Amino acid sequence: MTLLRRASASLPPVVQFINRPIHSLKLTGEPPDSSSSPTLTHGIHVFHCPDVVGIVAKLSECIASRGGNILGADVFVPENKTVFYSRSEFIFDPVLWPREQMDEDFSKLSKMFNAMRSIVRVPDKDPKYKIAVLASKQDHCLADLLHGWQDRRLPVDITCVISNHDRGPNTHVIRILERLGIPYHYLRTTKENKREEEILQLVQNTDFLVLARYMQILSGNFLRSYGKDVINIHHGLLPSFKGGNPSKQAFDAGVKLIGATSHFVTEELDEGPIIEQMVERVSHRDNIQSFVQKSEDLEKRCLTKAIKSYCELRVLPYEVNKTVVF
């Protein structure tokens, strides 16, 4: 599936942790006193292009020439590959550097270096990413996302929740959704009908999708028709413990390390580029309840971290099935 194809008010691409970067550069700076410049605004720019001499200098010059100040910059050049990745955070005065001019300036840089990707985002000014959440019977990831959105910990707008599980009118999740004014769509699925056409209609105005323990496989036709990124979360007990009740299988096997993985959805089941992974130790002192609780907590934290990284333009595609996460 093609990852992220939009510019300016768009979404970020994919990433996994990279081994042995030959060049990795970080620049950090202190923001000026905001009291002296109350109009300063925070911007983010990511760049992916063929590696040549002078890219960092031109990026810095572009920002500085408009009165901007770089707060931090990450650069990655893979070993034995002529490709360049960067992510820059900067502050600027929108009066001195209007958004339209900013887009034009970075567009010129993109053409100069034949960039495969150049995305700029101003979080305080640009619209939040619109997402739809798909979930099945398990509530822990879905409820956590709703609480995160309510508490403004997630930089997204949730347009709707879609589920193949019929939740009763007075259940915890439904009460939260009603309080937040988020529509809930129950679509009963069967092996013969996954209701994908109806899902596509419901999500057509979203920027990306989140599968919060959605226990249905999305077809290749659905992914191609949607055409944007889909982020999934699952436990880290695979591949050793497949099928029903993997937590019980892993508990009975006496595993000492559990985890969670958030990744992009592709046609290959659970094989998409990895965005985030987390692990935690378990021991003989855990019972099945504490074991499951630790596993669910990992899934919630891992999914939230992946979504935030994506929205903050920290995730870039790397090679066929990897990601760079700054």
Image (spheres, helix red, strand yellow):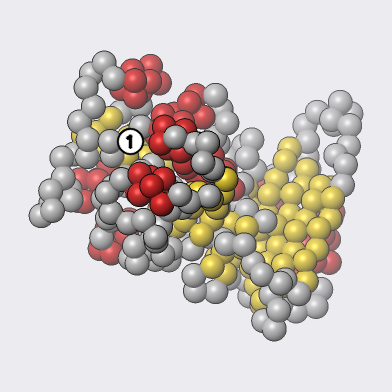
Q: Nearer the viewer, residue 198 or 36?
A: 198
Crowd class of label 1 (few under 14; some 14 to 19; many from 20; radius 10 Å): some
- Given residues 112 and 257, the one toward you in this image is 257
Residue 319 percent coordinates (x, y)? 55, 74
Residue 196 relative to residue 47: left or right:
left
Between 82 and 45, which is closer to the camera in this rendering?
Answer: 82
Q: Is residue 146 something that shows in the picture? A: yes
Q: Quadrant of residue 122?
A: top right
- At a point 28% along the width and 36% down the height, the residue shown is 137
Q: Quadrant of the C terminus?
A: bottom right
Task: State the count of labels.
Answer: 1
User: Quick one: 289 or 211, which is closer to the camera?
Assistant: 289
| Quadrant holding the N terminus | bottom left
Give SS at disc 1: loop
Rendered residue at 34%/67% (across/down): 268
Q: Residue furthest front?
A: 284
In the depicted structure, whether residue 280 falls above or below residue 153: below
Question: From the viewer's perspective, is residue 47 above or below residue 296?
Answer: below
- x 79%, y 51%: residue: 72
User: What residue type is disc 1 on?
Assistant: Gln
Give the residue at the far bottom of this rendering. Answer: 80
Q: Residue at x 78, y 71 (%)?
A: 23
In this view of the protein, can residue 293 be seen by the observer?
Answer: no
Q: Position of residue 42 (x, y in %)?
A: 72, 41
Residue hosting label 1: 138
- Where does residue 200 sit, x and y in percent of width and height? 26, 49
163 horizontally vs 156: left or right: left
265 relative to 67 in the view: left or right: left
